[in-house]
Image (cartoon, rainbow, N blue to C red):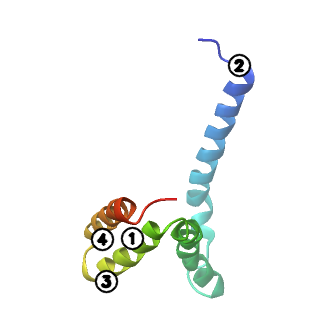
Amino acid sequence: MNLDPATVMAIIAMAFATYATRISGFIIGPYLPEQGRLKQALDAVPAAVLTAVIAPTLFNSPAELFAAVVTAIAARRLPALGAIAVGVCAVLLGRQFLGHW
């Protein structure tokens, strides 16, 4: 197997970037505020990122929208693992019967 030096350097750079991103939380974490507006903004980031990732998927096909509605209902009544299982089953059934574009 012949490895291109540019490929090896790209892999090393990506590994470094991943490690730097993960370790930065430990380095700057103690300096983040424990109250105030910045704290509220940082607390909202995970929900905003999750919404940004999931929202475009909802409009790919009727199956995904169906699964999102079913999962939202299940999440109000079941623990997280149960809601995930219901969501996976809903996507499978939705794609089978409603189609996937």
The residue drawn where x is 25% and y is 82% is 77
Foreground mark, 1 or 2, reads 1
Foreground mark, 4 or 2, reads 4
Q: At label 4, which amino acid type do we have?
A: Ala
In the rendering, which numbered label is found on residue 83? 4
Q: Which of marks 4 and 2 is nearer the N terminus?
A: 2
Where is residue 54 drawn, in percent x and y?
53, 68
Classify 10 Å Cα crowding around label 3: few (below 14), some (14-19), many (20 and above). few
In the rendering, which numbered label is found on residue 81? none
Q: Distance between the residues labelled 3 and 4?
A: 8 Å
Classify 10 Å Cα crowding around label 1: few (below 14), some (14-19), many (20 and above). many
Q: Distance between the residues labelled 4 and 1?
A: 11 Å
Q: Earlier in the sequence, mark 1 or mark 2?
A: 2
Q: At label 2, which amino acid type do we have?
A: Asp
In the rendering, which numbered label is found on residue 67? 1
Q: At label 3, which amino acid type do we have?
A: Arg
Location of residue 99 with respect to 13 vertically, above or below: below
The residue drawn where x is 74% and y is 25% is 6
Q: In which quarter of the image is residue 44?
A: bottom right
Q: Name the residue under label 3.
A: 76
Q: Earlier in the sequence, mark 1 or mark 3?
A: 1
Foreground mark, 4 or 1, reads 1
Q: Distance between the residues labelled 4 and 2?
A: 45 Å
